[in-house]
Amino acid sequence: MTTSRFSPRRLTAAFSLGLALVSGSATAAGEQYFPLQSYRVGPYAAGGTGFFGGFIDYMQLVNARDGGVNGVKLTWSECETEYVVEKGVECYERLKKGLNGAPAAATNPLSVGIAYATLERSTADRIPLITINHGRTDSTDGSVFPYVFPLQLNPYSEVSAIVNYIGQREGGLDKLKGKKIVTLYHGSPYGKETIPILDILSKKYGFAISHIEVPHPGTEQQSQWLNIRRIKPDWVILRGWGVMNPVALKTAAKTGFPADHVIGNIWSNSEDDAAPAGDAAKGFISITTHPAGTDFPVLKDIEKVVVKAGKGNLQDPKRFGSVYYNLGVVNGILNVEALRIAQAKFGKRPLSGEEVRWGFEHLKLDAKRLQDLGATGLVQTLTLSCSDHEGGGAVRFQQWDGASWKVISDWVQADRGLLRPIIEKSAAAYAKEKGITPRNCAKES
């Protein structure tokens, strides 16, 4: 899948020649640039096309409806990574210098592997690296990772909230003692990152935890689910990505494991994860930081100003308001708000990455601001700081009814008090390894 302006064949040819797909005007004056290390082909194309489609459509809305951010137009270019780390690094280096003189505000690769591979580069170049709902958990500690922002939800918060929800379903966290939980994870740095915190939580609450890996891309899982049937867990946490998710649900059904006791993580929560599994997905539960749907003023504005004007970035209009698309819109809101906040300090002009970083560290979305943005119910309230680059740590749970997702819980908060010392210890070890002197966030607050 690709944008409405280019065919997949033409896109592939362009990217193979190392070209970027540019949107927006070509003049440098009054423009802020967002380099996009996107992926629209390959096994994870559904996530990439939805996310980057929503992100781009939000920026198009801001340009068309508002004239940009305080008169500064937003511009961007895409470089196809295919979700491959080496290509992601190449794209980063190609795009980081800005576009026609317009400075880069932040990078948003939507890939744990690419984020890990470009973290030190981005820090050295003083360009914020945004890893919304993913990335390395210890980058939550901004004193050590000043340019990395795992916005809304880091991986440790994700699994902590899932365990808290399972505790609710079992009648209390004390009822987890003696239970069995399996985590079925994607065989990548992303999939493996939560193993240590799940081990800690299992000891804290007394449940048995088993970790079972599914090699990329996840199209064959028979042996894994036979192992799960042998273990006989009470719950399975699915930390999947792309095609792995519907295959997991289909294979679970074949081995007799109930879908309503499989809980998908943040990258196992889209229509593209559930619908291809057919009846096997009915009852499947997943977490979400944002609902699907179009019943939000900001989505209605995008539909009116961008989509109906024939400028929508999605090839398939049925995906408008989907989980991945709405995450892209949320990401657009957070990036643009950081820019707006930074402009209030540094001036209503294109800003450097270092200046935009300040905006992210002072990002605050309260109920009033969300209402003004038309994003009430779409984005959780969020407050970031020098020391806290996550800012949220809460999720809701949704259930697939065979055709769409239905939210079935209030906000469930991660145990951030438990997680924070673990995060700080990991960040301190990274700082020691890299010879980094952590910032004094007390002085910068």
Image (tube, rainbow, N blue to C red):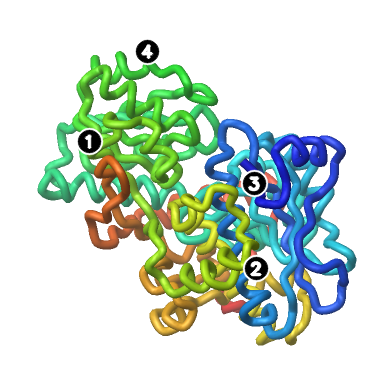
State which tag comes first along the sequence, 1 or 2. Answer: 2
Q: Quadrant of the N terminus?
A: top right
Dot 3: within a 10 Å radius of its alpha carbon, few (fewer than 14), some, or many (20 or more) residues?
many
Q: Which residue is mark 3?
A: 115
Q: Determine the CA span between mark 1 and mark 3.
A: 31 Å
Dot 2: within a 10 Å radius of its alpha carbon, few (fewer than 14), some, or many (20 or more) residues?
many
SS type, badge 4: helix
When the figure is inspected, residue 246 is found, relative to residue 389, above or below; the finding is above
Instruction: Give the image location of residue 163, x and y in percent.
Output: 27, 45
**Residue 60, numbered circle:** 2
When the figure is inspected, residue 345 is found, relative to residue 276, above or below; the finding is below
Residue lying at 39% horizontally and 49% vertically, measured from the top left = 158
Callout 1 amino acid:
His
Q: Determine the CA span between mark 3 and mark 4.
A: 31 Å
SS type, badge 2: helix
State which tag comes first along the sequence, 1 or 4. Answer: 4
State which tag comes first along the sequence, 4 or 2. Answer: 2
Instruction: Give the image location of residue 368, x and y in percent.
Output: 41, 84
Residue lying at 64% horizontally and 46% vertically, measured from the top left = 115
Q: Which residue is mark 4?
A: 223
Q: Which residue is mark 1?
A: 261
Left or right relative to 152: residue 17: right
Of residues 201 and 64, the one nearer the viewer is: 64
